[in-house]
Image: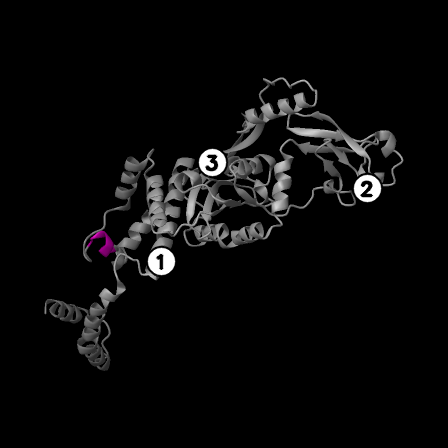
């Protein structure tokens, strides 16, 4: 707010836009900041502004939400990373926990197993809570510097228009916020044909959600997490009809159980594995048993992996760097959101909505100008250009040449003002 007021004081274009004269005093910045707090705190005014601008872009046919790109970026919080307290908090239950437990018990019953009993024990974890901004979360990514930050979970279309945004602490995983962002897109625009996401979203539940909504997922290749020198999971063939795995030596790994995390366990026969020539590359188990775990929704992951090789999905995923990645680049480079000076999730959400609304507005204005659909036709300015040229050639240029000969540089301001006023009145 201080920087904005300082800019208004010296920028003539800002003064003209706000209706202030050249000599009028601009109100103190605290006047605006206090009104800002009193009028907008606890309201959804910035979300309404964002939605209204997006609706205008849709009305002009600029938004193409056939393919949607979803990702998140981290914004450094205004908090000292060394000032925090360690607290024991309850682990967040997965949003789909009840649905998963239901599917697990159905799967166990289908295999002749007893359903699992619900555990009443509350799981806890230790977290670092900032003393400065408790809403932020400690970010520890890829061994980089640990800082308190927020995540801006964002969706955009193929033209770069932002369709939805959710702000959350940086220690909340991307996959947790995916469904909320997708629901915002469907509410504001429509259901997309395809969604492009990065590897952080490539898990069974998210892919199940995408397929259940009859949307095509465009996902990247993910490297197998098997140790070097050992056989990869894809080298073991899954037989869906008999519900078993077949190893490269044509031996069968049979179903054993389905655990609480939703993974089916398949085990080999230790008598056959004991003398197997591939055992050293297969397992290090002391009981000579190979175990493979398969999620009950693994089929959705495999289907997404098959679609990944299609030309359409390749083309959609390739556009990520031109769409959502560019949105984040503009957010940080052109709008100063590599870090924030605000504190609290509510304020950050307002800021995110306002900044993305501004980005959409600028893009819409530029595109309409190029299409000749701006608020006025540029040809109407031609007569004004003629008048300006006349003033420049008749009065200003001769005056400047005289002043230059006399060695004067800045004393012609008042004369120029009177000349321009006379020309306008004539």
Secondary element type, mark 2: helix
Crowd rating for badge 1 (residues with CA inside 10 Å; few <14, some 14–19, many 20+)? some
Secondary structure of the residue carrying tag 3 is helix
Quick one: label 2, few (<14), some, or many (20+) residues within 10 Å?
A: few
**Residue in view at x 52 percent, y 44 percent:** 195
> Could one spot residue 412 in this view of the protein?
no
Where 372 falls versus 157 (above or below)? Answer: below
Q: Give the percent coordinates (x, y) of residue 246.
A: 78, 36
Q: Which residues are magenta?
A: 15-20
Q: Residues within 10 Å of mark 3 (few under 14, many from 20)?
A: some
Q: CA distance from mark 3 to mark 1?
A: 30 Å
Residue at 59 percent of width and 41 percent of height: 202
- Residue 366, label in figure: 1
Measure the C-alpha gap from mark 1 to mark 2: 59 Å
- Which numbered marker is on residue 124? none
Give the residue drawn at x 14%, y 71%: 419
For label 3, the residue is 180
User: On the picture, is 176 further left or further right than 353?
Assistant: right
Please provide percent x and percent y for residue 342.
40, 41
Q: Nearer the viewer, residue 1 or 293?
A: 293
| Mark closest to the chain's N terminus, 2 or 3 | 3
Is residue 383 in view?
yes
Would you name the residue on which mark 2 appears?
Answer: 281
Q: Is residue 173 magenta?
A: no
Residue drawn at x 63%, y 44% is: 305
């Amino acid at each position: 707010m201080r920087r904005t007021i300082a800019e208004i004081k010296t920028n003539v274009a800002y003064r003209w836009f706000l209706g202030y004269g050249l000599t009028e005093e601009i109100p103190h910045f605290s006047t605006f900041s206090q009104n800002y707090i009193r009028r907008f705190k606890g309201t959804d005014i910035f979300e309404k502004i964002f939605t209204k601008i997006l609706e205008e872009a849709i009305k002009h046919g600029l938004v193409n939400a056939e393919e949607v790109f979803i990702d998140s970026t981290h914004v450094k919080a205004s908090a000292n990373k060394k000032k925090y307290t360690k607290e024991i908090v309850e682990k967040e239950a997965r949003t789909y926990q009840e649905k998963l437990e239901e599917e697990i018990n159905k799967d166990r019953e289908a295999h002749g197993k007893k359903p699992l009993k619900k555990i009443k024990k509350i799981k806890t974890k230790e977290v670092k809570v900032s003393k400065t901004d408790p809403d932020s979360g400690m970010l520890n990514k890829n061994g980089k510097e640990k800082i308190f930050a927020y995540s801006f979970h964002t969706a955009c279309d193929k033209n770069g228009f932002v369709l939805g945004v959710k702000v959350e602490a940086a220690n909340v995983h991307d996959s947790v916020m995916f469904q909320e962002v997708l629901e915002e897109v469907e509410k504001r625009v429509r259901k997309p044909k395809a969604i492009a996401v990065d590897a952080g979203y490539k898990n069974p539940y998210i892919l199940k959600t995408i397929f259940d909504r009859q949307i095509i997922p465009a996902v990247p290749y993910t490297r197998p997490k098997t140790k070097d020198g050992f056989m990869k999971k894809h080298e073991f063939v899954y037989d869906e009809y008999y519900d078993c795995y077949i190893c490269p030596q044509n031996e069968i790994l049979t179903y054993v159980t389905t655990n609480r995390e939703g993974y089916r366990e398949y085990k080999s026969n230790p008598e056959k594995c004991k003398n197997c020539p591939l055992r050293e590359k297969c397992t290090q188990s002391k009981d000579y048993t190979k175990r493979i775990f398969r999620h009950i929704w693994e089929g959705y992951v495999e289907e997404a992996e098959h679609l990944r090789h299609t030309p359409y999905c390749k083309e959609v995923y390739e556009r990520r760097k031109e769409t959502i990645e560019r949105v984040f680049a503009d957010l940080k480079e052109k709008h100063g959101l590599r870090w924030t000076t605000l504190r609290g999730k509510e304020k950050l959400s307002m800021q995110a909505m306002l900044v993305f609304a501004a980005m959409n507005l600028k893009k819409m204005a530029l595109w309409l100008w190029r299409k000749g659909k701006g608020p006025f036709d540029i040809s109407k300015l031609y007569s004004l250009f003629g008048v300006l040229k006349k003033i420049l050639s008749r009065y200003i240029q001769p005056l400047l040449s005289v002043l230059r000969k006399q060695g004067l540089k800045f004393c012609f301001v008042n004369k120029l003002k009177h000349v321009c006023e006379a020309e306008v009145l004539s």
